[in-house]
Amino acid sequence: MTKAIRIHQNGGPEVMQWEDVPTPEPGTGEALIKHEAVGLNYIDVYFRSGLYKAPHMPLTIGMEGAGTVVAVGPGVVNVKPGDRVAYAGPIGGYSTQRTIAADRLVALPDAITFTTGAAMMLQGMTAQYLLRRTHRVQPGETILVHAAAGGVGLIMCQWAKHLGAAVIGVVSTAEKAELAKANGAAHVVIGHENLPAEVKRITGGAMVPVSYDSVGKDTFNASIDSLAPLGLMASYGSASGPVPPVDIAMLGAKGSLFLTRPSLATYTAKRSDLETTAAELMDVVSKGIVKIQVNQTFPLAEAAKAHIALESRKTTGSTVLIP
């Protein structure tokens, strides 16, 4: 048998149940992996609460993990039993063992621990596509990063600094401000109430070419008003709730702005894109350019406590669940 956190209905953290489930058999193109560590991400909250529609019930949530291949099904050639692997994407991570499409797995170098691997895949590959593809950050640019002390935010602060950009990090507390600064943010703004004015002051009136916003409803307008003409608003999360409908004429009135709602699933849908994205992430982590900060760990059986901490903004950096 396998143990898993499953939900039978949408709701608060209390709907997550630690249950016995049959150990799955890998089908054609699939691998069975034994998790050594599982990543915690805000998308898990979205599926638990019902903001994102569950594909079925009961549902094992979780989008990220690292572990060892136990068995493979017919037609699998890219991994074999005993391989160290990590992934981000297919739902079903809150389990001791799971099957997964083998072409979604990437090799985890020996230099990277399972805990780091589970903490870095979803957040790190998100940072990669945002900084290298959604808007290809250039040396000398000043960019805006919301939730700068969160998992994605800390990676973006470090990576963007390495690319020669200056990050204006937006955080909610003085403690988080210090953390963002320690990880490469050139400027930090606490709260978003006066954000456009602060951005104007910091940039000498130029404003920013891109705003990376994972907060959603509460910060959308402040992000838009911080952009330079022809700037890009990358709204990639909804931690404060979904953004209400937008009048697109506003984008023209505020400077012919661009608005995108990117997702990791789209940016890594092709195997070649997944490999490129993961390889670039592994490279900067292996070289120490980006340090993955696992600031909280919880037993997988206590995932509800981890969700409470995440939703109450008590966490910084990455959080990992240990089976």
Image (cartoon, grey):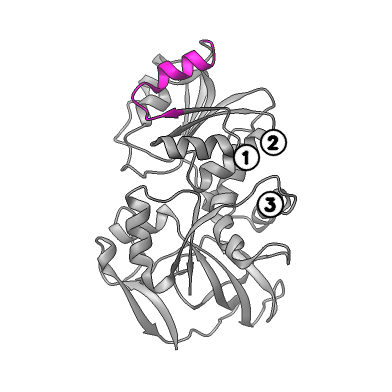
Q: For residue 119, say whether it is visible.
A: yes
Q: Mark 2 and mark 1 in contact? Answer it, CB < 8 Å.
A: yes
Tell me residue 146's x, y (percent).
46, 35
**Mark 1 burial class by Cα count in 10 Å: few <14, some 14-19, many 20+:** many
The magenta stretch spans residue 199? yes
Spatial CA distance of label 2 from label 1 is 6 Å
Q: Residue, x 33% and y 30% (percent of image)?
A: 246
In the image, the segment drawn in magenta is: 189-204
Viewport quadrant of the N terminus: bottom left
Q: Residue, x 24% and y 61% (percent of image)?
A: 11
The secondary structure type at the circle numbered 1 is helix
The secondary structure type at the circle numbered 2 is helix
Q: Which circle's residue, 3 or 1, is located before the other in the chain?
A: 1
Residue corresponding to mark 3: 285
Q: Amino acid at mark 1?
A: Gln
Residue corresponding to mark 2: 162
